Amino acid sequence: MLYRNRTIAKAVLSVAALLTVASTGLANAADLPAVPVKAGPAPDVPFFLVNDNRLTYSYQFTATDPGAFSTQPNGTINGTTAKQVYSFTHFDVWAYGTNLFNIDMLKSGHNDPASPCSPAGTLPFGPQGTCAGVTEFYGLERSTFGWNEIFNTNAFKMGPLRNISFEVGADIGTGNSYYAPSTNNLVAGLQFAFDLPYKGYINVAPLVVKGLASHKSFLQCGLFSPGVPGVTCLADGNRVFPATWRIETNYYMDLGFLPESIRYFAISGRVSLTGPKGDINTLPALSGPGRLSTASKIELNSEPIRLTFDAGKAFIGPKYSHFVDLWVAYRYWHNKYGLDSDATPGTCTVAATGASTNSCTEKSASAGISVKF
């Protein structure tokens, strides 16, 4: 495919060179040399057809972290925390597909305290307002390999369907909260890419997710008591979940129906559904009815709507379209990390009363600015 593209490019440049000579009027047939004219070497087609890098700062007003909550003086439970998010995003297109890499650093407020934290006060693991907030890192990578490109065909392009691709990737995350969570997932499957009006698209990807290790401090031997490894605790606190399914969708569309004078807006969004992955733990002493262990649930992680204002185009000019974007969005994340929002004691519900901690379902507005470089 790449060789074919380079050959076509060189042929086009050769023809263009001859047409340029003929159109200048500086030579006639008698002046042309007897030997064929050879064009000079043509530049290679770049490896990356698109190479886009961005830095983003955003603010989530009422984010959550499962198990982080405080009891207010009136008895109500506050399970939300503001989060500042610093992100780097890379996206590229090459001859056979695409690559997306994103890494976030999230900084929570005091209602989501970092560990260690004094056990006194109204927070489960520290006094409200005196402990530094949690710092999290989360990385996501996705790569696609288009069937049209691999097989050098248009057979997988019909109607609104633009392409079918193999998709692979990984999710890696960690944070310095009391629970010391970590995530290490591999994903693989297919992606179906569809066109939308106004240069838009929607991608649907059915995937298989395999967790390599998910760390939870409360499962680790020696934290509360010596324990019996494999019976009442895990030696390193790492729980390996079985493979499950996931469906990831994302879309983008310019609001091209707006008058040209205000055609600076676009909408986008994403929805991810992840299937149950078994019990939160499988320890014999903690399993069974009425025990700490509860079954995981289907996880819905979504940003159904994001409205983007193209400040680069509006204030600098079309040449700088999307160099600076301002946006607002709404996030909804139910059964966060697969935890049962209505049942997981000590995390999603208060162990003593069964009341919800309001920390396992996230409903938050967010706003941010992205700069291309």
Image (spheres, grey):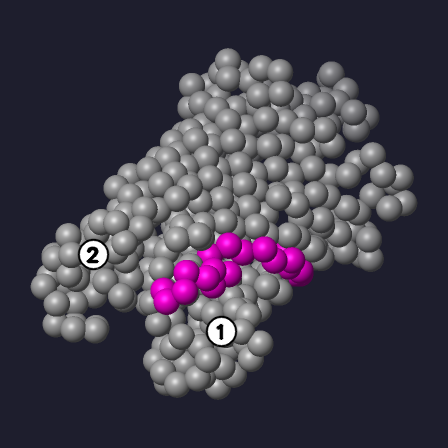
Q: What's drawn in magenta, residue-wise?
A: 351-373
Residue at x-position 27% and y-position 66%: 217
Classify residue 126 by image quadrant: bottom left
CA distance separating discs 1 and 2: 26 Å
> Residue under circle 2?
286
Q: Is residue 49 visible from the viewing direction of this image?
A: no
Write down the quadrant of residue 242 in the picture: top left
Q: Amino acid at mark 2?
A: Leu
- Indicate the secondary structure of the residue bearing disc 2: helix
Query: Where does label 1 land, which residue?
Result: 70
Locate residue 192, reporting x and y percent.
50, 27
Q: Nearer the viewer, residue 208 or 338?
A: 338
Earlier sequence position, callout 1 versus callout 2: 1
Secondary structure under the numbered disc 1 in the rendered image: strand
Label for residue 232? none
Depicted 298 relative to depicted 357: above or below = above
Residue 184: x and y in percent read 32, 52
The x and y percentages for residue 372 are 63, 56
Q: Is 360 within the magenta?
A: yes
Quadrant for the C terminus, please. bottom right
- Residue drawn at the location 46% of the way across and 39% of the way down: 273
Residue 188 located left or right of residue 2 = left
